[in-house]
């Protein structure tokens, strides 16, 4: 063989080898991220989710891809989004932002693994057989919201010992969470002699209308029910509460950071980190049926004293001393 022919053959083979090697490499796994909210203001949750993935050995864009589906607080869009993720044959669906995304994912597939993050009881709504042994293709994180209603009401009563009537703003679109929140609140309020007024809202326009109705009744305080809608609308809620000068308590710290008065609830960012970590474990081969549903155990009280001053409120020193964070 002539020298030129030999060099050409070797060079051609060298060019083929990397192509063959790349062809044999497994495709990058894809996570379907299904959420009822909008990406606006969701950055802290996503950072926490990605941190959990990283702890499990996965970094977006390097060894895993994420296909995002945001329902923009329109629950009716979730079934189509879930079905599309199934058609794309994602490796796992991370469903968060309440029970609706998880229920939509569960209805769309019985084979693709699902990792959920929900405030409701996953056994009661049919996502898993039990917390310890989920069975099926779904598992995840259960963080408490409605179960903490009595605690939030107690903190509000401590802040306003003279209060006699409290209004509660709830999202009509999330029926299960609405019922549990109202039931818990009415029971807790009755035990301490408070009257409750329920105000429904499922979008920004209805939130404005609810505050107009609220001011006709002039309750002593406002209780914001849990749910992604009220996190998405946190600036609107803080502005309305300040405009109408009504003390307001929330379920998560995001609202207080936006100017709300006080919150008590699960550390939701920590819950999203756990969702990411569980998603990573599933990508490594763990079966949802064998991964127990984790329940959040970290709760936080956050108080915005600047907002308290605007409302001409003196926050008791005993309450400030118990706060996990005071925003001044």
Image (tube, rainbow, N blue to C red):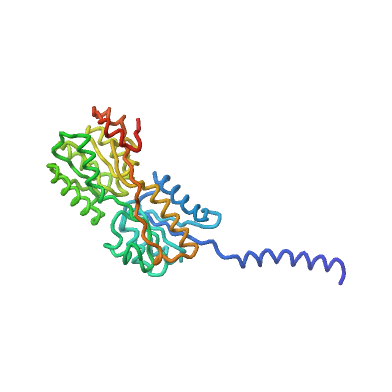
Residue 253 position by quadrant: top left
Tell which residue pokes out farthest to the bottom in this image.
1
Q: With 176 as the anchor, is 295 left or right in this view? A: right
Tell which residue pokes out farthest to the right in this image.
2
Q: Residue at x 33, y 52 (%)?
A: 143
| Residue 196 or residue 20, whichever sits in front | 196
Q: Residue at x 22, y 50 (%)?
A: 181
Q: Position of residue 224 (x, y in %)?
A: 25, 44
| Residue 289 or residue 85, whichever sits in front | 289
| Residue 249 or residue 12, whichever sits in front | 249
Q: Position of residue 98 (x, y in %)?
A: 32, 54
- Number of marks: 0
Q: Position of residue 189 (x, y in %)?
A: 16, 45
Q: With 23 as the anchor, is 200 left or right in this view? A: left
Q: Position of residue 50 (x, y in %)?
A: 47, 51
In the displayed structure, 26 sits above or below 34; it is below
């Amino acid at each position: 063989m002539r020298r030129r022919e030999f060099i050409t053959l070797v060079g051609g083979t060298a060019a083929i080898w990397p192509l063959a090697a790349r062809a044999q490499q497994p495709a990058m796994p894809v996570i379907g991220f299904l959420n009822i909210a909008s990406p606006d203001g969701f950055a802290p949750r996503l950072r926490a989710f990605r941190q959990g993935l990283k702890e499990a050995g996965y970094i977006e864009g390097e060894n895993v891809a994420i296909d995002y589906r945001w329902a923009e607080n329109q629950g009716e869009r979730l079934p189509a989004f879930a079905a599309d993720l199934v058609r794309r044959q994602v490796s796992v669906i991370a469903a968060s932002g309440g029970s609706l995304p998880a229920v939509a994912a569960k209805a769309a597939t019985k084979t693709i693994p699902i990792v959920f993050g929900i405030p409701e009881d996953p056994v009661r709504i049919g996502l898993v057989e039990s917390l310890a042994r989920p069975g099926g293709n779904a598992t995840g994180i259960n963080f408490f919201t409605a179960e903490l209603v009595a605690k939030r009401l107690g903190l509000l009563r401590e802040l306003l010992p003279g209060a006699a009537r409290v209004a509660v703003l709830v999202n009509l679109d999330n029926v299960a969470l609405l019922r549990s929140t109202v039931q818990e609140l009415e029971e807790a309020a009755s035990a301490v002699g408070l009257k409750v007024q329920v105000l429904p809202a499922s979008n920004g326009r209805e939130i404005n209308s609810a505050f107009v109705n609220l001011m006709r009744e002039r309750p002593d305080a406002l209780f914001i029910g849990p749910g992604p809608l009220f996190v998405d609308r946190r600036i609107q809620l803080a502005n309305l509460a300040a405009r109408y000068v009504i003390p307001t308590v929330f379920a998560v710290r995001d609202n207080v950071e936006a100017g709300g008065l006080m919150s008590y609830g699960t550390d939701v960012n920590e819950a999203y980190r756990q969702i990411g970590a569980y998603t990573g474990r599933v990508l490594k081969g763990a079966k949802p049926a064998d991964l127990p549903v984790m329940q959040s155990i970290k709760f936080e009280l956050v108080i915005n004293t600047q907002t308290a001053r605007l409302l001409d409120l003196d926050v008791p020193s005993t309450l400030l001393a118990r706060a996990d964070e005071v925003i001044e």
